[in-house]
């Protein structure tokens, strides 16, 4: 195996033993490579189809879900990937046939490409997989550029899939995704072309996050400033984690009046900020913190847990029998809730199990505040502008992104604590758990930690920055009193970072390390052109970013 897609990759170079740091096994990693290889073939053909005005709806959805399934901590199940590769080959062959029936000529050189022509029995997949991973690209710089494109596309797939399940899609985004994935096997593209493509991924990242923002807010209402309870009630409960709001909606509907409570975990916390979910009296609060603490927190929850997306940690035996996955999430031996043709999921077995379980053990008590999406910040803009003008707010520090289990991430808690009292943290994603319970106080009624939601809501923070640029009539968004100290972990964060670079934000601090998939040459290019840097000590970074 060779995988270097996330922040905790071995020695920041690549997981290449029998198992990744995240617990992903060699076979699963290899099969993910093979799936991506086959998806490239589908995308080459889909691109031809799209150029000839042929719709590729089935292929589009398959691409989104497949890329999404290969994201860190989403699906660990080897058998799931074997089935998926077979489906990919079948889909690719059907598309070939469809094109040929429509008399659309495909260049023979394309048809000869391995990703379009390879086929094998399932027993041979693992062998085949050995030759198609990132290490099959010899040149390190090219490999790095292609990895950046593919990882950005994985993030895009996750967000586009969330929008799709809510009935929102943008064909332009899907066409771009096929085109971009197909480009990764185009030897004619120079490194400069690949760099331009990386910026395009950022551009489409913004479009995708905007689409998801629209889907979420049209479906569930504009976020409201909300206080969320972090203690527990007396009933047994179901804990729901991940990012899929539709799954939450179905679970809340089906569990109404059943004598159980629903709690959110990790990235599901921001669901409490949407008005549509406030009507459920059994929507009890948030339990626990970021994804990486799930082993101890799931253990103490006592009831069933539903993982709708990443981040799943390989479960302990103590709670594995009350863990459920759905959507693209999977783990061998863990029960999976399927979706029917209409998108409906039957959660009755989870609800039934909850009734037989003990109520959750209390971890903490009190409440946290969030819901500061761009529309709310717009409403508060007079207050914020006054606070900036009269010097009560000197700087906004964007500390969005992901949390992780590495001890080096304590830096973010210490950094938040060390920030001067005239600074405000803008956050989104699971990174917030490092400082959202620290009680950092308020400035003229504005909390010093403003949580805009899930990692995809980082889009909201960018909209906020552009709004402030307009209010202060500035020529460049980098002239705002806004600095970035972002934590990253997996590939959605890669997309968010590319989107910020595309929007023109400079001098972003990203940590706790720069991505291991950036070769020295590519990293130097980004550092030189965008001022990207990584963390050092809290003291030095406070000096550097705050002055
Ligand atoms: Fe976190 Fe995991 Fe939301 Fe990620 S729970 S790390 S960037 O999946 O997606 O912020
Ligand atoms: Fe390693 Fe991260 Fe890949 Fe897991 S996802 S195998 S930790 S690089």
Image: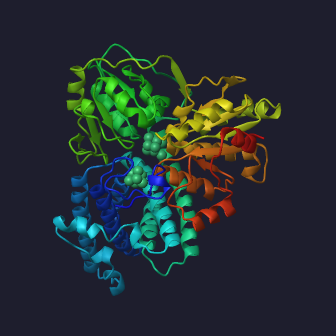
Q: Which colour scheme appears in the figure? A: rainbow
The percent coordinates of residue 357 (x first, y second) are 24, 20
Q: Based on the displayed image, in which of its 4 quarters is residue 179 positioned?
A: bottom left
Q: In the rendered view, tell whether residue 368 sits above or below residue 249.
A: above
Q: In the rendered view, tell whether residue 240 sits above or below residue 136.
A: above
5 and 40: which is toward the camera: 5
Residue at image point 33% right, 24% down: 301
Residue 268 visible? The answer is: no
449 and 280: which is toward the camera: 449
As drawn, the residue found furthest toward the top would be 234
Residue at image point 43% right, 61% down: 174
Is 379 on the left-hand or right-hand side of 388? left
Residue 503 visible? The answer is: yes
Task: Please identify the quadrant where the C terminus is shown.
Answer: top right
The percent coordinates of residue 102 (x first, y second) are 28, 78
410 and 70: which is toward the camera: 410
Residue at image point 36% right, 39% down: 246
Badge count = 0
Is 99 on the left-hand or right-hand side of 194? left
Task: Please identify the quadrant where the N terminus is shown.
Answer: bottom left
As drawn, the residue found furthest toward the right would be 390
135 and 258: which is toward the camera: 135
The percent coordinates of residue 222 (x first, y second) are 53, 35
Residue at image point 28% right, 60% down: 31
The percent coordinates of residue 404 (x first, y second) are 48, 41
As drawn, the residue found furthest toward the bottom would be 108
């Amino acid at each position: 195996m060779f995988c270097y897609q996330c922040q905790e990759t071995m020695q920041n170079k690549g997981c290449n033993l029998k198992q990744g740091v995240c617990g992903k096994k060699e076979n699963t990693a290899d099969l993910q490579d093979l799936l991506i290889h086959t998806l490239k073939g589908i995308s080459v053909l889909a691109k031809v189809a799209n150029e000839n005005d042929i719709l590729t709806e089935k292929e589009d959805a398959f691409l989104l879900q497949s890329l999404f399934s290969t994201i860190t901590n989403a699906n660990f199940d080897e058998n799931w990937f074997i089935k998926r590769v077979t489906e990919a080959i079948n889909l690719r062959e059907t598309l070939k046939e469809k094109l040929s029936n429509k008399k659309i000529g495909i260049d023979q050189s394309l048809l000869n490409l391995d990703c379009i022509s390879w086929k094998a029995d399932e027993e041979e997949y693992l062998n085949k997989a050995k030759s198609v991973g990132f290490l099959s690209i010899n040149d390190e710089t090219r490999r790095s550029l292609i990895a950046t494109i593919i990882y950005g596309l994985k993030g895009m797939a996750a967000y586009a899939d969330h929008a799709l399940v809510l009935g929102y899609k943008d064909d332009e985004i899907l066409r771009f995704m096929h085109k971009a994935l197909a480009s990764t096997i185009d030897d004619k593209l120079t490194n400069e072309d690949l760099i331009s493509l990386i910026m395009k991924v950022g551009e489409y990242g913004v479009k995708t996050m905007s689409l998801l923002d629209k889907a979420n807010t049209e479906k569930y209402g504009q976020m409201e400033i909300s206080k969320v309870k972090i203690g527990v009630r007396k009933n047994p409960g179901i804990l729901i984690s991940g990012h899929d709001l539709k799954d939450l909606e179905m679970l809340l509907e089906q569990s109404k009046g059943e004598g159980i409570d629903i709690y959110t975990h990790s990235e599901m916390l921001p669901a409490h900020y949407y008005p549509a979910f406030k009507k459920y009296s059994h929507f009890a609060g948030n339990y626990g913190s970021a994804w990486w603490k799930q082993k101890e927190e799931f253990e103490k929850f006592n009831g069933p847990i539903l993982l709708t997306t990443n981040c799943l940690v390989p479960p302990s035996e103590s709670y594995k029998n009350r863990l459920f996955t759905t959507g693209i999430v999977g783990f061998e031996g863990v029960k999976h809730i399927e979706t029917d043709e209409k998108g409906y999921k039957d959660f009755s077995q989870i609800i039934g199990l909850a009734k037989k379980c003990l109520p959750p053990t209390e971890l903490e008590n009190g409440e946290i505040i969030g819901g500061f999406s761009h529309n709310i910040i717009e409403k508060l803009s007079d207050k914020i502008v006054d606070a900036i003008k009269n010097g009560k707010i000197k700087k906004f520090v964007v500390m969005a992104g992901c949390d992780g289990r590495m001890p080096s991430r304590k830096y973010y808690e210490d950094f938040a604590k060390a920030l001067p009292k005239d600074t405000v943290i803008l956050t989104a994603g699971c990174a917030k758990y490092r400082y959202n319970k620290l009680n950092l106080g308020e400035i003229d009624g504005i909390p010093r930690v403003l949580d805009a939601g899930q990692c995809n809501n980082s889009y909201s923070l960018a909209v906020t920055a552009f709004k402030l640029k307009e209010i202060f009539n500035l020529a460049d968004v980098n002239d705002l009193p806004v600095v970035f100290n972002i934590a990253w972990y997996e590939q959605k964060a890669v997309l968010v970072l590319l989107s910020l670079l595309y929007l023109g934000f400079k001098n972003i601090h990203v940590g706790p390390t720069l991505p291991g998939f950036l070769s020295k040459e590519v990293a130097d290019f980004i550092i030189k052109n965008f001022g990207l840097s990584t963390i050092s000590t809290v003291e030095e970074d406070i000096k550097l970013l705050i002055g």
